[in-house]
């Protein structure tokens, strides 16, 4: 168990987590987590240790797991074109789109295609100016253990008007109140002082906070007015054209009307993430069988995933 705790502490330090972040992911209180780490927890600790073991396994799997291939749909092209626009013309933009709508994969692909011009970081779950500075500083290759002022200096010496700074999942700031606001102001200041482009990606809750949240609306409205910072919205519906690009990428034939309606309904409910994972698993199964992928394999992937969720682990995972 000591190895698990040591691994989790190392992971937390690397990802700039707080004790509360780790406790929340493990499903325990911060006080309980602190007692476990100190070895002073007096109640039955076994259930909590099992939760920590499960957390470690999940995080390790995410670190080593295979990334799904990037499919350049119309939505993805729009996102990458917006990134290029904000970079080229030194604009600031906020891209709003539902969860699993492909925002993150598109900006990651844009960063892969423009490694010398893009600094892409994911907004931490628990936000503060220092945590954001740390992630940006780490992304540009700065040494660890720098003071905030040193990180700012290093970042400003790196960023130029030809760069684009992307903060993915900026809606996380809404859960950090004043520290989140200071984090947004810190990002805005980096943009103002460097002259680089800035793109923030967020879910619709961020836009809602801009419009009528008691604490956030005034500050965020000011953000949107500064430096030509505009709000851009992805469509609220994934088109059949985009879905066709995805299933053709994975090698599926044109589905019949009923199956197509089922795929479209699943996409509108859960976004690209669920659909692409099912298709990815289906293609792996078909490849293992040495046959072309069909929609029967897609339906089989759905059944396998449902069995796993119900506690029935298949033999051929």
Image (spheres, rainbow, N blue to C red):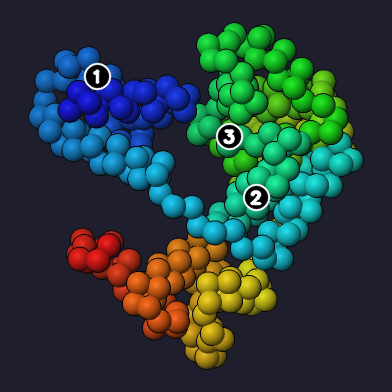
- Badge 2 element: helix
Choose the circle earlier in sequence order: 2 or 3.
2
Is there CB contact under 8 Å for labels 1 and 2?
no
Choose the circle earlier in sequence order: 1 or 2.
1
Density class for disc 1 (Cα within 10 Å; few <14, some 14-19, many ≥20) is few
Q: Give coordinates of residue 158: x percent, y percent.
A: 75, 22
Disc 3 marks which residue? 123
Choose the circle earlier in sequence order: 1 or 3.
1
Examine the image and state in which quarter residue 50 appears.
Answer: top left
| Residue occupying image coordinates x 82% and y 43% | 86
Q: Give coordinates of residue 229: x percent, y percent.
A: 82, 39
Density class for disc 3 (Cα within 10 Å; few <14, some 14-19, many ≥20) is many
- How much space separates mark 1 and mark 2, taking CA atoms? 39 Å
| Residue occupying image coordinates x 20% and y 23% | 2
Density class for disc 2 (Cα within 10 Å; few <14, some 14-19, many ≥20) is some
Disc 1 marks which residue? 37
- How much space separates mark 2 and mark 3, taking CA atoms? 17 Å
Examine the image and state in which quarter residue 69 appears.
Answer: bottom right
| Residue occupying image coordinates x 63% and y 46% | 108
Name the side, left or right, on which 162 lies relative to 301. Answer: right
Q: Is residue 246 above or below residue 221?
A: below
Disc 2 marks which residue? 109
Relative depth, front residue between 19 and 30: 19
Q: Is residue 249 above or below residue 262?
A: above
Outermost residue toward the front? 290
Q: Give coordinates of residue 245: x percent, y percent.
A: 63, 73
Quadrant location, the C terminus: bottom left
- How much space separates mark 1 and mark 3, taking CA atoms? 27 Å
Relative depth, front residue between 102 and 139: 139
């Amino acid at each position: 168990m000591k190895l698990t705790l040591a691994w989790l502490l190392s992971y937390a330090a690397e990802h700039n987590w707080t004790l509360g972040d780790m406790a929340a992911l493990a499903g325990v209180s911060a006080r309980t987590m602190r007692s476990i780490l100190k070895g002073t927890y007096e109640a039955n600790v076994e259930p909590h240790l099992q939760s920590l073991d499960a957390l470690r396994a999940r995080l390790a799997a995410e670190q080593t797991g295979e990334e799904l291939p990037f499919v350049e749909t119309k939505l993805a092209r729009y996102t990458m074109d917006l990134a290029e626009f904000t970079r080229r013309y030194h604009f600031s933009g906020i891209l709003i789109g539902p969860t699993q709508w492909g925002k993150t994969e598109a900006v990651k692909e844009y960063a892969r295609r423009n490694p010398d011009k893009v600094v892409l970081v994911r907004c931490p779950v628990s936000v503060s100016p220092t945590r954001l500075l740390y992630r940006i500083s780490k992304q540009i290759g700065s040494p660890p253990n720098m003071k905030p002022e040193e990180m700012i200096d290093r970042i400003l010496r790196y960023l130029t008007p030809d760069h684009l700074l992307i903060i993915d999942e900026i809606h996380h700031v809404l859960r950090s109140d004043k520290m989140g606001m200071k984090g947004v102001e810190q990002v805005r200041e980096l943009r103002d002082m460097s002259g680089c482009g800035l793109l923030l990606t967020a879910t619709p809750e961020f836009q809602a906070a801009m419009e009528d949240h008691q604490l956030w609306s005034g500050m965020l409205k000011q953000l949107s007015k500064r430096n030509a910072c505009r709000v851009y919205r992805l469509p609220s519906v994934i088109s059949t054209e985009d879905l066709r690009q995805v299933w053709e990428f994975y090698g599926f034939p044109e589905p019949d009307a009923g199956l197509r309606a089922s795929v479209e309904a699943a996409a509108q409910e859960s976004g690209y993430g669920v659909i692409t994972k099912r298709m990815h698993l289906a293609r792996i199964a078909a490849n293992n069988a040495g046959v072309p992928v069909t929609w029967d394999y897609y339906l089989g992937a759905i059944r396998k995933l449902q069995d796993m969720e119900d506690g029935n682990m298949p033999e051929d995972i």
